[in-house]
Structures are given as C-alpha cells and as structure tokens.
Image (cartoon, rainbow, N blue to C red):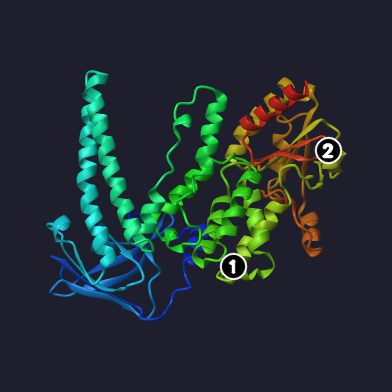
Amino acid sequence: MQITKTLFIGAVTLSSTLILFAQQGNQPSDEGHKIEFTIKPYQNQWIYLAYYYGSIKALADSAYLDGNSKGVITGKEKLAQGIYIVASPSKSILFEMLVSDDQQFSVSMDTLNPDVSLVFNGSDENQRFTDYTKFISGKAMAIESARKEMEAAPSEEKKKPLQKKIDDLNTEINNYRKGVVEKFPESLLAALFKSMQETPLPPEYQNPKTRADTLAQYRFGKDHYWDNIDFMDGRLVRTPIFDGKLKNYLNNWVVPDADSIIYEQNWMMALGRNDPEMSRYLISYFIDNYMYPKIMGHDKVFLHTYERYVANDNPITNWLNEKQRKTITERAYMVMANQLGAPAYDMALVDTVGKVKKLYDLKNDYIVVAFWDPNCGKCREELPKMDSLYNQWWKKSNIQVYSVMVNEEAVGEWKNLIKTTGKGWVHVHQTKEMRTEEEKAQLPNFRQLYDMRSTPTLFLLDKEKRIMAKNIGLEDLNNVLKQKLNQKG
C-alpha cells in the first residue's frame, strides 16, 4: 500500500529498513487488541493507524469505515505500546492516541469539530491524554500571546509582568504533569511527562561569568541530561521524544569524536540491555547513523557496534534477517581495513609502462592517495586543482600523490590525460589480469580496503603510511595538510 511521504516514511535504505525491522517482535499475545472507530463524516473509506519508531512514522494497520462511519482494528497480539497516529483517507493526521496495556477501547470523532468531539471510551489513559491536550492548548495560546506582547513592549518595565505571566503558565503546565506522574506513576502518559522534564540549573550555574563557570554549567547539564529517562522503558522508543533527546545529546553534548560516542553508547546499552525494545532500538540507531557517517572517522562507532552486537551471529541481534546481517557484515569489513590512525593497505600497482610502483616504496612526509576515473566529470574538475596545489606548495613540502586510475576500460584516456596533469605524481592502475589473479586467490581488492565507493576518493597518509584522513574533499584535505605542517613547524 502506497503511503504519502508527508506522513509515513518508507524504507529506502538498508538503515531505515533496519530501524523498521527492529521494531518487530516481543509483543505479548494475551488478550490482543481491538480498537473501534467512529470517524465522521468518512463513509466507505479507509483510515490508517501508524506508529512512531524514533523519527520514523510507519503504517501499523488500517480500518475500513462503513456507511455509518464505523470501523475496527483488531488482532490476536497486543500492539507495542507507544504513541500512535490515526490518519484520514488522504493520509493526513487526524489525532494521536496512546496505546498502553489496555488495548480494548473505542474512539469517536467528528472531523468538523475535532477538538470537542474526540472521545475515548474504555481507555482511561487516552482520556487523560485528551484532557491534557485540551489543557495545554489553551496554555500554549496564552504563552504565545504573551510572547508577542513582550516583543512589542517598549521597555523592560513593561516586559516584566508579561514574563511573569509566561513563567506562571509554565508552572501550571509543569504542575499538571507532576500531578499525573504522582497519581499514575506507571502509566505511559507519566513516562512521557517525566521524559519532558529537565533538571533546572542551580542558581550558581545560571549566569556564568568565567570559562570555568561555563564548563561547570555544561558539566551539570550533561550529567543531568538523562535524569528523567528510564532506559528500561522500551515504550519510549515508540514516541518522537526519545529519538529527539538522543540526537540532541549526541550532537550537542558529546565531544564529536568516535571514542566519546562509543563511551556513551556503552553505558546506554548497559542500562537498556534487559529491555528488548530499547536494546533493539539503540543497536539499530548506532548502525543507522554511523554506517555511512557524515563526520570522518565516525564509522568507528558503526564498527564497534558490529563487533559487539552483530559479529559471529551474536544472539542479541537475532532479529536481523540474513540479508541485513550480510550487508552489515560486508560494510564492516569495508571500514575495518581503513580506520583513522591505522596503517594503510600497501598497493602494488603498475604505471603506464607496466612497472610495479608500490605505495610503501614512497618515502615522502605525506602521501595523498587519489582514486579517480578519466571519465568522471568530478575527477576532471578536481585533478587540475590538485595539480596546482602540488606545484604551488605540496612538492616543495615533500608531499607526494599516489594517483590510482580505477577504470580498466579507460587506459587510453588515462595515458593521454596524465601527459598534462599530475607531472611528478606516481600514476598507477590495476590491469584486468592483476584483478583476475587477485579474485582467484580470494584476496581483498583496493576498492574494498580503501572503501572506494565513488570517484574521486582521497586519502591522506603520513610518512609511516598511517591514515590521517579519508574520503575527504580536496579543500579539506589541503587544510589538514596546512594544519599538520604548521604543527610540525
């Protein structure tokens, strides 16, 4: 069934497929679920039930509304608990509801007057949720109105009572949530309200004046960031709240290097390992976000996840199907051979006259390894720029280019192009015969060992052939070299 992307996100990559697949399983079968709908004025049309899974919204089921606008969604197994979306025949959101332990209830609504007409019968949890939604709607409008008045206020004196009004309204909202948490501590709604709470900064941290004050404020915020999140409550992964907090934490509170992220992942998994929903979600998240990371070197996080939770048919990820496990494993083997700081693979390729030129024979202080194709437009654009940098300052700084032409069918174009571009570089390629022999011997190819998925692909090596930078743009690579040479000088 085709669902519009504005509401439901399809699984278009392995990663999103993995996230969606991870949500399956571990659903208790006792009693099952039965949710009856009366949604006017829809007649003889389908409505849809969707669920959150992190940042993804996906189809869970559908109900056909008859001539009386009535329909039902039922099943022998219980639905996983969380926030669900009820969508119209056109796939627009009608309302959200909570699916908790009690999954035998009915809901009615008239879309001509949705706020007043939405009623749940047999679900105390959803009635509390509806009551809160109505309560918060009025408070939010009042806060927004006060904020607009503050923006237009001519003086600080005029702004003070408006700020007090906003503070008082926020206090009312927080007190409302606290009341639900105290009265119904084990409810899904209480878990949601707790996850929204932030630990307030102590007075001494609120107005930092020195760098030490700022660091103390940061440390307090980081230490108390997860105070109200229970990593043993898998219901939270089926809400948009937990995913947002996790992304914000990793992007804004954690030092952006792989080892720091791995440290955070380890304690999260230690807390959530006994909750199947949470464990599956965390593993999926770290595979999904670091398998092809945006930041160089963060694939180490993916590799750590693979080695600890996927490799050797680890039973903790028995929810992976064979195809997923194979794809993840192949990707892991692609990145484990070229981690930052590790020795690069020693290539022994041939030049234009068939003479072997080994990478490790180069004795320069720095080596730029460039994989390219004469028929690649981006390569034809970048190589002359690299040639200019080489002639301007790389050559005199003892920086060499090991230039690997990767298209076996373009040897003629390659020979013509390097007559005018890259003089002084080491130009090599792999012949078809060499590649065939390599495959017969079941040896890994440089394409795998250097994670070469497109051209141009650039690596930077130091004198000992350790990987300093990989899969990096020419401008960034040049900046790294400048930094390294300045440090050296």
In screen coordinates, is 312 left or right of 143? right
Element carrying mark 2: loop
Q: Residue furthest top?
A: 155
Percent position (x, y) of residue 470?
68, 41
Position of the N terminus by quadrant: bottom left
Q: Is residue 252 visible?
A: no
Q: Residue at x 46, y 53 (%)?
A: 229
Q: Is residue 169 visible?
A: yes
Percent position (x, y) of residue 445?
75, 54
Circle 2 is placed at which residue position?
464
Q: Is residue 27 above or below residue 453?
A: below
In screen coordinates, is 132 left or right of 396? left
Residue 59 lies in what quarter of the image? bottom left
203 or 100: nearer the viewer = 203
Element carrying mark 1: helix
Residue 202 lies in what quarter of the image? top left
Q: Is residue 34 above or below residue 261?
A: below
Circle 1 is placed at which residue position?
317
Viewer-side label of 2, 1? 1
324 or 317: nearer the viewer = 317
Give the CA distance from mark 2 to mark 1. 38 Å
Q: Residue at x 59, y 39 (%)?
A: 255
Q: Residue at x 63, y 57 (%)?
A: 305
Q: Residue at x 24, y 43 (%)?
A: 140
Q: Is residue 13 above or below residue 422?
A: below
Three-letter residue code for mark 1: Thr
Position of the C terminus by quadrant: top right
340 or 345: nearer the viewer = 340
Given contact means CB atoms under 8 Å apart, are the residues at marks 2 and 1 in contact? Answer: no
Percent position (x, y) of residue 395?
77, 24
